[in-house]
Amino acid sequence: MKPSPFTYHDPQSVAETAAILSEVEDCRLLAGGQSLMPMMNFRFVQPSNLVDLNGVRELAFVREDAGRIAFGAMTRQRTLERSAGLRESCPIIPLALSHVGHRQTRARGTIGGSLCHFDPSAELCNLAALHEAELVLARRGGERALPFAEFGVGYLTTAVEPDEFLREVRFRRWPQGHGYAFEEFAMRHGDFAICAISCLVTLAPSGAVDDIAIAVSGVGAVPFRLGEAEASARGERPGHDLYRALATAASKVEAMSDSYVSAGYRQHLARILTYRAVKSAVENAGMRAAA
Amino acid sequence: MSQTRSIAVTVNGRTYEKTVETRRTLVDFLRVDLGLTGTHIGCEHGACGACTVRVEGEAVRSCLMLAVQANGKSIVTVEGLAQGNALNPLQQAFWEKNGLQCGFCTPGMLMTISEFLEEVPSPTEEEVREALSGNVCRCTGYQAIVDAVLQVAAQARAEKEAV
Ligand code: FES
Ligand code: FES
């Protein structure tokens, strides 16, 4: 079908966007349009006002400093996928993006759009959990920064208020040479993930796990970390026993079930993919450190 | 309460100035307003890839863009590939390898692959299949399409080496 009529706004700056949002009601923000446009074509969503962010150039950037990497909300997935800088400093981003939709959708899709849509299986939401993302929400006359845990409220739901919009996303930056892995299971390439596990790890000179992060998506209504299991892994020697313990912890999480995939199957995938992800992250941490 | 805007869009080298409803999708603009019906609509929700066109060089789904978002931009559609009656090498390879049956998916396939081969001139079969993951074909089983892409890539390599 076709979208129902709306009033179209195309602000050119953050300030102009904030001003429009402070005035209009029943409004949707259009980022890359790879989720909102289908919903509008189906008329699941029929906003009276559409605010198109594609003209707001100051929302498209990647900035790296010592402790973190900041992304403008309108940075295209394709830009992140191709970034030589990120390939060095945060190689899990291009790796995970290869699972996001298809080349045509990544050309338009943005990091901010994906986070604000907040699909439980979205790879970028998984990465935000993994990197303890901080999300900067702007509104007229101010802004606030939310930790990821407070940003994602529930299934397809975020804490963004109607007069607010996502301006910037900040990822924690891991030390050079850290290990990384992204393991996903979907029915076909580019389909929604039934389960995805990401892992980052650093090893101490002794070879023991120094720091580790594991994020699970597609399984619960929001992506989450295996916090307790991560804590118990720090200081341990990597190997089959550790991978198995982490995999077991992953299989005990609460899981969604729907008409295609049972909760038990999602937990099974969480177990298998966690084992693989941690093992491969540990192995490439060793290799990258040696290189 | 429908709202309109005037836009200027360059399609296959020719600039069109039109007044469109702001809710007009890019694919409807191309097909209905400009009469360029080579670009197909399969699903209208981003699932099939039949509507793929190149906007500023990038292959995108034109059912998921608004015509107003194309204002000032340069677009290439399937009509922009052939030179008069002469098929371009990719089209020729589709012809030779039976890369189409009903032809419904073909415009989207061609536009996707034309971008992909500029980026990856010597792809492996696996890379071709991954590049085509966003284009659905109900007829060919994909094998003939993959063959056509690999053939045209091999030809381009051979020509380059001959120079
Ligand atoms: S018509 Fe656009 S993707 Fe199917
Ligand atoms: S040739 Fe018929 S859908 Fe592809």
Image (cartoon, rainbow, N blue to C red):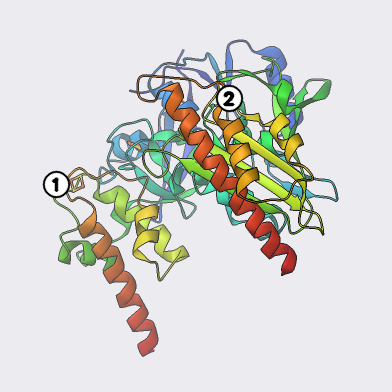
View extreme (front): residue: A241
Q: Amino acid at mark 1?
A: Cys
Residue under label 1, please give it: B102
Q: Which secondary structure, mark 2?
A: loop
Chain bearing tag 1 is B
Residue B130 image label: none
**Who's the residue at 24% across and 53% down the image?**
B142
Which picture quadrant has residue B13? bottom left
How many numbered discs? 2
| Residue A110 in view in this figure | no
Image quarter hosting the N terminus of chain A = top left
Residue A108 location in percent, x, y? 52, 42
**Who's the residue at 44% across and 17% down the image?**
A5
Q: Is mark 1 within 8 Å of ligand 2?
A: yes
Does residue A191 sit above or below A42 in this rendering?
A: below
**Who's the residue at 69% across and 33% down the image?**
A229
Q: Which secondary structure, mark 1?
A: loop
Does residue A82 sit above or below A278 in this rendering?
A: below
Does residue A288 sit above or below A99 in this rendering?
A: below
Q: Nearer the viewer, residue A268 or B17?
A: A268
Chain bearing tag 2 is A
Q: Amino acid at mark 2?
A: Val
Q: Is residue B155 left or right of residue A143?
A: left
Mark 1 or 2: in front is 2
Residue under label 2, please give it: A253
Q: Residues within 10 Å of mark 1 (few under 14, many from 20)?
A: few
Residue A84 location in percent, x, y? 66, 60
| Residue A3 in view in this figure | yes
Image quarter hosting the C terminus of chain A = bottom right
Say whether mark 2 and mark 1 are on the same chain. Answer: no
